[in-house]
Amino acid sequence: MSDLRDAARRDDDENNARAAAVAAADPLGPADRYGDLFVAVQSARVFADSKTFVDCAPLGDPDDIVAAWQDRKARPGFDLAGFVRAHFRAEHPPASHYVSDPEQTLVAHIDGLWDVLTRQPREHPGRSSLLPLPNPYVVPGGRFGEMYYWDSYFTMLGLAASGRHDLLRDMADNFAYLIDTYGHVPNGNRSYYLSRSQPPVFALMVELFERDGVRDALRYLPRLRREYDFWMQGSADLRRGEAGGHCVRMDDGALLNRYWDARDIPREEAWAEDVATAARQHARPAAVVYRELRAAAASGWDFSSRWCEEGGGLETTRTTTIVPVDLNAFLHKLEVQVARLSADGGDEAAAADFRRRARARARAVERWLWNPAAGTYLDYDLLHDRPRVAPCAAAAAPLYVGLATPGQAHGTAAALAAQLLQQGGLATTGIASGEQWDRPNGWAPLQWLAIVGCARYGLQALADDIRERWLATVGSLYRREGKLVEKYALQHAPDGARGGDGGEYPLQDGFGWTNGVTRRLLHAVPRHPACRVRAARRN
């Protein structure tokens, strides 16, 4: 045990030294750093995408840029766009010499993309919003040039299938570094993401590292404990029926969790969009709307009818009044992991404590999130004191982590098949709202949770059915267009599958978690026809 601790300590020291050598991020987020210059740039839509400006690197000292802005902004003929071009450099993906073979197989295409999607610490620009990391990391692609929390778990599945244990080790230590440095894993490694996290899947990552022989899980126990403290902060002070931060004390005294963001201003990376959303309603202060939109972003489901008033649009988002099935399933997994690793490390008192916590959460999930009448898991609506009505694919999460009873697993699987199974895979929800985490779109992480969750309970026919539909979708679009994308429309056009749509930005190519889940699925069935799918040669 002491040898393991010594090795982990040496690795941590090396990671800290490497991170210290990387160009430092601006300690302030763009909105706080640039003040009314930031507001002016985003209001004027100097860049079509609100994310572009917050990812820019300043070409001089930020304080000097702000001073120059204050001096010049009122002058006749002042050119805001020209000022921005003179003082900031828009960041673009690093140059890559990778050229995709238009006739290579789907598996070869994914394997060849890992290096294209990998970013190096030395590429970090100084004084920007990009948080330094000690090791290389894989990004989703497109407009997403930073590492994202829950995306990375699904990407890692594919890295393991591709035999890229070098990147898995690097990613493992990057997430440990983030927890050590900030006390939690931010939504992504940008300063403007520090006020929120994403679905807590570090426990799942640690399990993957251990199973694939990448890292011993015990070295990450202190980080798992610290992440747990982040999610449970303030819980001891809550009375029945109260919520605070990420925690909710239910009416029976049970403790569950919700998504939360510590700030109540527009998301800096979507400033114009959030201001426009808040302006469409007058029932709540804008700050409340901003907090709810931020909490929805923390869920990873940004955005969805799942978080809205039933029948309402995006402006009715009220994420913090909803107790989510998937979040509490992932936190149950975290509690189980901490209990197991504490026992492995000889701390039986901590192991007993976390076994108790896991049992208490399991009872609370059954009491509040399992719905016998519907025969499936449903989020709980605190505002209306009842389960949410609309089903969603998050119901697969308790199966994935092994929290469901056999009866609950069978009921949930039947509900998913009856209500959400589409031509191209498992739908996100049954509602067509125009938001990207709703019908008609399907997403790789939700397919994976459902496929593995069903298989875990012996429901292999449904697991195989979802897998076949999803691989047919991904393969169809790859055959026609030679790429993988962020999300897919689950009803195919006459000439095959199409990428999904909806939401606040265009469909992105790449794409980290689609690559990861698809590669992992094909690794499990190496003779699957999709392994041999080739992109059509285009003139």
Image: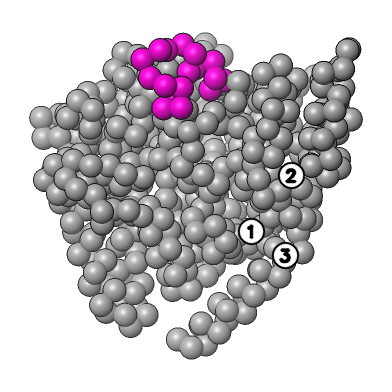
Image x and y of residue 351, in percent: 27, 73
Which amino acid type is shown beneath numbered disc 1? Leu
Which of discs 1 and 2 lies nearer the camera? The answer is: 2
The residue sitting at 86% across, 24% down in the picture is 72
Q: Magenta region: which residues?
A: 273-289
Q: Main secondary structure of the magenta part?
A: helix
Instruction: From the viewer's side, name the closer residue of 278 and 537.
Output: 278
Does residue 451 appear left or right of residue 398 in this picture?
right
Which of discs 3 and 1 lies nearer the camera? The answer is: 3
Does residue 317 appear left or right of residue 135 in this picture?
left
Instruction: From the viewer's side, name the closer residue of 112 and 290.
Output: 290
Image x and y of residue 482, in percent: 67, 29
Residue bearing mark 3: 20
Pointer 1 or 2: first along the chain: 2
What is the C-alpha distance between the residues marked 1 and 2? 25 Å
Question: Is 287 part of what is drawn in magenta?
Answer: yes
Image x and y of residue 207, in percent: 42, 62
Which amino acid type is shown beneath numbered disc 3? Ala
For mark 1, give the secondary structure.
Answer: helix
For mark 2, give the secondary structure.
Answer: loop
Instruction: From the viewer's side, name the closer residue of 490 and 219.
Output: 219
Residue bearing mark 1: 167
Residue bearing mark 2: 128
Image x and y of residue 42, in percent: 68, 23
Which amino acid type is shown beneath numbered disc 2? Ser
